[in-house]
Amino acid sequence: MIKSIFTFTLGCAFCFSVFSQSNFKVYTPQASGPYALQNILQNLIGDGIILKNYSVSKTWSDEAYGYFEDSKSSLGMKKGLIMTTGGISGLCGKNTQTGMSNYAHSNERTHAVTGSSKFTSPSLENLLLKKQKTYDAVSIEMDVIPTADTLNFKYVFGSEEYDEYVGTAYNDAFAFFISGKNITGQENLAVVPGTNDPVSVNSINGGSQTNRKRSSNETFYVSNKNGEFGIEYDGLTKLMEIKKAVVPYETYHIILTIADVADNIMDSGVLLEGKSIVSYEKSYNVLFDKNKTELNEEYKNMLNALVKEYKEKTNSNISIIGHTDNEGDEELNKNLSCDRATQIKNYFISRGIAEKRLIVDCKGETQPSFDNTSEKGKTLNRRVEIKLLGNDNLYQVNKTKESGIAAEKSSIINNVPNPFAQNTSINMSILSTVKNAQVVITNLEGKQLKTVYVLERGNTNVNFESYNLVNGVYIANLICDGAICGSIKMILEK
């Protein structure tokens, strides 16, 4: 099958379009200021999470990632990180193209014809049937420390492959890889709820008349053919949620990856909600009757018990998120979810919980956790989620007591294990006075392979994975405020 190629390029620092139901803006990354990558990633981090370091392997497009805002919260999110296989500047505006390939690069035509294989994602390919080839991959990595026992995160996947190429090889996909304590190898958490299927064009869709394909997991899909979301993608998932049991105060390595599959045209992207990477201790659901906001008596005993417990944990915030089923008007459903969440908030306040600890959000019908095609699923979606969020104060207090803070100089200590087969931890000590710290990985010829920006001070570490590197010796250099403050040799033996 030969696909038509469309190109669309805008040379602007940001673009925006305003429609009756949306107001979507995107901002390209800057060297400093609010749209610097560090600040964009820090914006993803919510309660109970410490961001230790990060790195990016972006595609050939200079606009492969950036920052988005949606004042209407059309997708259930107001702001966050956006990653795309094309360029973000082409996304703003009503959906006017059936297939956009936004080549934000001078040799876009050459790239479109030849199909560069340089920017691939072997890890993503391993998740797909027949190990399909990937193109235009963009990956952002980070090490995080959860301070509670459940990691939580929210995103939306969108694509121009919808709906014409549903059921074909052009199965663009997104993955949220995690590794760390009590996790075997590298696990993908971006899956269709209740399955191990990665989130992709073929796993969540509304079907395809062109290919006579039935819908797949349609509860989690929304068409954008009419452009009501103010974004160019023809289709998107509903707001998806990731939950994973973790060990508090352990370091976990996260890789966010999106790629074109089978060819390098027709863009796909993922939008990651700001402040949505959180950790929490416990989660509870309060269900509501259809179109009702009154709190049922059966839940008051549970809420009273939570009040008693939460009063003792004064340093932890409480998340209260309202939801509805998909019946009725979307805007009315959002208001309904707000009214339900407010009921819980007011109940907690009336029982002595400080209002400043309560974080209220309204998702309406944008984030179903159950199948809305059944009455049981709709009943379970009429809910308010309550979560006791993690608290990083204890970690920060203990961190300041470490001897590494008071060390005479910053240094890179070692990497463990060494030799290593798949990944290794690079350990270092960085003075609190250091403003900018980086770990630069090179081969013996001096070719730079990866740069990790280190945000944590004192005794800290960086996770390095071998990916498709060949066996041999690699150098890790610690750069502190522009000067080398230590180097080590790492041996890769697979």
Image (cartoon, rainbow, N blue to C red):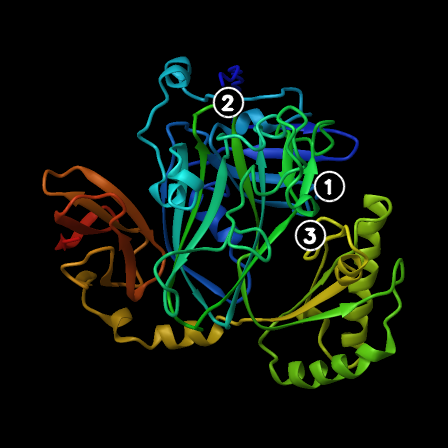
Out of 488 and 182, give the one closest to the viewer: 182
Q: Is residue 1 left or right of residue 283?
A: left
Q: Which residue is under mark 2?
A: 102
Most extreme residue toward the front is 212
Q: CA distance from mark 2 to mark 3?
A: 29 Å
Q: Residue 43 in the image: state x and y as whole percent.
A: 52, 51
Q: Say which quarter of the image contains residue 164.
A: top right
Task: Give the residue displayed 38% in from the left and 36% down from the top.
Answer: 58
At label 2, counting other C-alpha atoms closer than 10 Å, the crowd grade (few under 14, some 14-19, many 20 or more) is many
Q: Say which quarter of the image contains residue 251.
A: bottom left
Q: Residue 329 in the image: state x and y as whole percent.
A: 86, 44
Q: Which mark is residue 210?
A: none
Q: Amino acid at mark 1?
A: Lys
Q: Is residue 268 above or below residue 107?
A: below
At label 1, counting other C-alpha atoms closer than 10 Å, the crowd grade (few under 14, some 14-19, many 20 or more) is some
Q: Is residue 228 left or right of residue 245?
A: right
Q: CA distance from mark 3 to mark 1?
A: 16 Å
Task: Give the residue displayed 64% in from the left and 48% down from the top.
Answer: 239
* Closer mark to the observer between disc 2 and disc 3: 3
Q: Earlier in the sequence, mark 2 or mark 1?
A: 1
- Is the Cβ of the residue at disc 3 closer than 8 Å to that at disc 1? no
Q: Which residue is under mark 3?
A: 367
The reply to whether residue 491 is visible in this rendering is yes
Task: Give the residue displayed 83% in from the left and 52% down from the top.
Answer: 335
Q: Amino acid at mark 2?
A: Asn
- Is the Cβ of the residue at disc 2 closer than 8 Å to that at disc 3? no
Q: Which residue is under mark 1?
A: 72
Q: Amino acid at mark 3?
A: Gln
Out of 337 and 371, give the one closest to the viewer: 371
Q: Earlier in the sequence, mark 3 or mark 1?
A: 1
Q: CA distance from mark 2 to mark 1?
A: 25 Å
